[in-house]
Every structure is written in C-alpha cells, then in structure tokens.
Amino acid sequence: MSNKTYKVVRNSVLGRYMVASKNLKQGQLIFKENPLFLGPQLNGPARCFKCLKIIVLSRCCYCSGCDTALMCTNQCEGKYHSKIECATLKSLNIKGQIIMENSPLIFPLRCLLLRKYDVETYKRLLDLEPHLEARRDTAIWRRHRIAVENVMQEMNLLSEDDIKDELIQKICGILDINTFEVRPPMSQSISILKPETQCLRGLYLEAAMMAHDCIPNAHLSVDDNFVMSVYASIDINENEPIYFNYSNILQGNQERQQHLLEGKYFSCRCRRCRDPTELGTEISSIVCHKCRKGLLRMKEIEKDFRIWQCNECQVVFKSFLIELAINEARRRISDIDLSDLHEMENLHNNLVMTFHPNHYLMLELKQHMVALYAKLPPTKNNLTKKIDLCGRLLSVYTKLEPGISRIRALTMYELQSAIIDLSNKEYRDKELSESGLLSELQRAEKILKECAKYLLYEPSKSPEGRMALVALKELKYLRESIENIQKDVLINGQNERKDKKLKMTKAHEENSLNHKEKNGRIDDIENTSQKIVNSHVEYLEKNKNKPKKKNKKAEKI
Ligand SMILES: C[S@@+](CC[C@H](N)C(=O)[O-])C[C@H]1O[C@@H](n2cnc3c(N)ncnc32)[C@H](O)[C@@H]1O
C-alpha cells in the first residue's frame, strides 16, 4: 500500500489540486519539500545568490566562479548558488553589474538557467499555472516586459522562439502565482501584526499544487534550510482537498477578494467568503451610518458582483465609501503611539462607533493592546482587560483558523499567563478560594498545553519554536503547582472529616500557615516562569543585532 498522504487531481474550478489519499489526523505530516529556488520579492532588494541576504551595494561583489552571481561579501559561504548554476552562468558570460542594476531579473534568470542543466525539472516548472491569458497586457505584464524580458533580450539570453512563446511572461506568471512568502533567515519578529516586510519568495513544486481556502486545513512551516513541512491542521478525510490560505486571516472580505482576484486570478467561494457574516464573526462588518442599528456586510448578488448592504434598513453603500472608512481607520491606527494605553483605548472607543468590535481593524488594535498589557504592570485591572481581549480574539480566530494555528497559539500564550497572574493575585488577596485558584490554574494549564502543542509545529530555532520550549517549561511548573494544591485540598478535606472540632479551634492558625506556604510556592512559580520569559526576551534582545541565520516561516503564497 502506498504511503503517500496525498494525490493531485483536477477539476474545472480549481485546476489541479491536492487531496488527501487517506484519512489524515490533526498534526500528521502530509509532506516535506525542499525549495527548487529562492529569490527576492518582485519589488524587493537584490539578494546574495549564495546566502540570500540583502545586498549592501557598497560591499557587494561577484562570485569568483562565474563573475556574475551577486554576493554579499567575497567570504560568503551560503549554499544557494549551486556549482551547476555557477558553471551555467559562467558559460553565458553575463556581466555581474547588469544583474546588480536589474534585480527583478534574478529569480526569473535562475529559472531560465535550469533549462540548460536540468531539463526534466525545467519542464515541471513550466507546467505550473502562469495565468497568461488573464495577465496579457495588464500592468504587471508591462512591468515584467520592461524590467525582465527587455533586459534579458539585450543580454542575448532569449531566442526569437522564446519571445514568440512569451517564455519570460510565463516564468514571471509562474513565480507570481506559485511562490510562497518565506521569512528571511534568523527572523526575530514574533509579532502577529508586523510580518517581515522583506520576505523572500520560495518556489516549491509540490506545495504549489495546494488550492486556497480562507479556512485552511493545512499548516505550513519552513525550517532553517528552507525545507517546508505541511501538516494537517485539523483532521482531513480521504479525498478531501488539502487547503492552504493564500491570504491572511486578518484580511477583510473585500481585501481578500481583491488580493485573490488580482494576484491569483480567481474569485474565492469558500464558506467564509460566501457568508456575509464570515461564520458569524462579523470580521468585515461596519455599523450602518444610516439607521445606526444594523451592520453593513458585503454580499455577492451576482457572480463577482458584490455590494455592501445593511442587514436592518437594507440601504446599499458604495464599496469605495467603505474603503475610505477603512483607510482612514488604518491611518489612525498606524499613527498611534503603541506604548500609550490611554491613546489606544480612546481610539478603540472611537472606532467601535463605526466598526463591529470584531472587525479586523478592531482586532488589530486589540492585538496591539494585548502586546502592551503584556509589558504593563500586572495589576488586576490590566490582567482582567488582557484576559477579556484575548478571549475575544480567540473566539474569532478559532472559527477562521481552527486546529493548529500560529496566531491562536500566540494569543493563547498571552491568555494563560494573564489567567495565572490574576488568579494568584486574587488568591493572595483572599478574593479567590483555594479550589477557585485550583480551577483557574487548571484552565490555564489546558490553554498552555494547547498553545505548546501548536507551537511545537514551528521550526525549533524560530521565535515561535523557542517559545514552544518556554511554554513546555512553564507547563511543567504549572503542573507541579497544581498537583501540590490538589494534595493540599485533599489533605484539608480529610482533616476536616477526621476532626471537625479540633479544626474549628485551630482553623485560624492552620489557614494562615497554609496561606503562607502557598504564597511562597506561588511566588516560586511566578518567579520561575518570569525568569524563563525574561531569559527568552533577553535572548531575543541579545540576538536582535546579530547577523541573521536561516529561520523563517511560510506566510502566504
Ligand atoms: C498555486 S496554483 C495551484 C495549482 C493550480 N490549480 C494548477 O493547476 O497548477 C494557484 C491557482 O490555482 C487556482 N485555485 C487555487 N485555489 C482556488 C480556489 N479556491 N478557487 C478557484 N481557483 C483556485 C487558481 O487558478 C490559482 O491561481
């Protein structure tokens, strides 16, 4: 029996797509794949052919082998400029300076060179979807003609047949539609809201066969060597498609549709896109400015024709008005001081008059607030607010990204830490009984366990992978503490039954002793977990300015 977890099939809507060839369990590895090529973003800066780091023009040099490939320094020992690529470039006698001056041609050039040294793989590459017809004579087509095709023609890299066959447009289309965004080496950012701005693009021939769904069932992670692992994020039944989200969970309806239509040439008709409430989350909904009671939601009334309509008064709004409101709110969010809670709360209270509390911009603001609460003094008020915000974020994320999910794991981490801190404080202040403390810690344990489970799918050296280790250590201490409290509760219960009378008289003394002991233990947990978090933060801080190693995660295709 074949061990293969998937097969590629085809239909008239999705083209080729991957389906599970057997039932897959959540967390099961579906496949692992090496990139065929890595390269800069279309508009990204030039990168070293060997290590893929951004080239600093004043230090840039050319490979001593081919005198063409750009290198960050002549000592670079990166491995992404293969001997065969080097030899092929050398045979073409291209001036390195032309590459330097025309960085958009780096990635297409790498693909073009392949036909000279690996015809089979080149054929597989050319078999990917380029959406030539949809792109012909569009702005992107003209851009590639000027920035890539014309330059390659001047370099005598293209035959007349290549030009007639629109070969370069085909390669550029294939790269735009099929490559994945991968984080650059040794990324330090763990932030949900600030993805790396200067990502690389990676071409993975197998992974390119995954279709898109805004509610994915596959989780991707890319390790230090750019090896991509694709896991089932939830259970997947035999013959069910394996879906990856080409867009972003925090993109609204309109932006997602635009991204998919303009960048990937299809209209998404997944469960989330067909439902104007987006699975009841209202993540794109706006308060109706006419009746002030209803919500404006986007709905498709004819194929590819969508309107914004109030669910109460039925008034229809033009989509550009919605865009204006969103752009203005986005500007205001980007202008606020992210260390000023008061400013953030004011903006939140202001925007909630226009946007549903679950609107993705409100979620973005809430996410910033959670990050700030994590840095503020852990007062009961701050902790309560943090718990509330995390709960709201998770209620949306769980619907839109069920199962293994990075964004959920990171929010869960914040949630459990606030629950532990708050319950300890309340217990100490005698606002929470021992059994109340126990049940809150057990709730935190459950969340932390799930968080660690999801983070363990991240590459071990990535910020999330390191956070998984922190979460595991914290889980161990939390469990020990729970066990100790459980023993206490048990002993207290037995003693109570044995000698009620004696206990009554000694109650005051015993209580104060237990309390003292537990406080010591809780301090222990707090100190230890705080130490771990501090060392984690210190580690991140310390390494912030160190040269980056490979370490990234696929974000979107
Ligand atoms: C990365 S490729 C996937 C492989 C491609 N279907 C093929 O046959 O080569 C992305 C393209 O697949 C198609 N596709 C993927 N997901 C889709 C979806 N949910 N609905 C419609 N088309 C989809 C679109 O044509 C899109 O541009």
Image (cartoon, grey):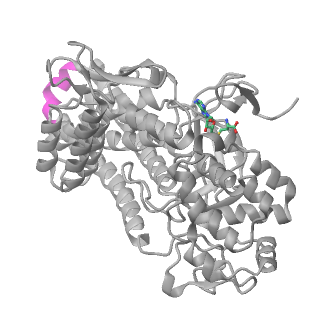
Q: Quadrant of residue 29?
A: top right
In this picture, residue 90 sits left or right of residue 502: right
Q: Position of residue 452 (x, y in %)?
A: 48, 43
**Residue shown at 66% from the left, 27% from the top:** 241
Q: Nearer the viewer, residue 476 or 53?
A: 53
Question: Which residue occupies the extreme right position in the image?
Answer: 1
Q: Nearer the viewer, residue 467 or 65?
A: 65
From the viewer's perspective, is residue 332 above or below residue 184?
above
In this picture, residue 305 sits left or right of residue 517: right
- By secondary structure, the bulk of the magenta-drawn segment is best described as helix
Ligand 1 found in image quarter: top right
In this picture, residue 533 sits left or right of residue 221: left
**Residue shown at 38% from the left, 53% from the top:** 191
Q: Which residues are magenta?
A: 499-509
Q: Magenta span has 507? A: yes
Q: Magenta span has 413? A: no
**Residue shown at 72% from the left, 48% from the top:** 205
**Residue shown at 71% from the left, 50% from the top:** 33
Q: Position of residue 245 (x, y in %)?
A: 53, 37
From the viewer's perspective, is residue 484 above or below residue 1?
below
Let me know if residue 219 appears in the view.
Answer: yes
Indicate the quadrant containing the N terminus: top left, top right, bottom left or bottom right. Answer: top right
Q: Position of residue 188 (x, y in %)?
A: 44, 62
Q: Nearer the viewer, residue 124 or 529?
A: 124
Let me know if residue 442 appears in the view.
Answer: no
Q: Position of residue 402 (x, y in %)?
A: 49, 29
In this picture, residue 40 sits left or right of residue 387: right
Q: Quadrant of residue 435?
A: top left
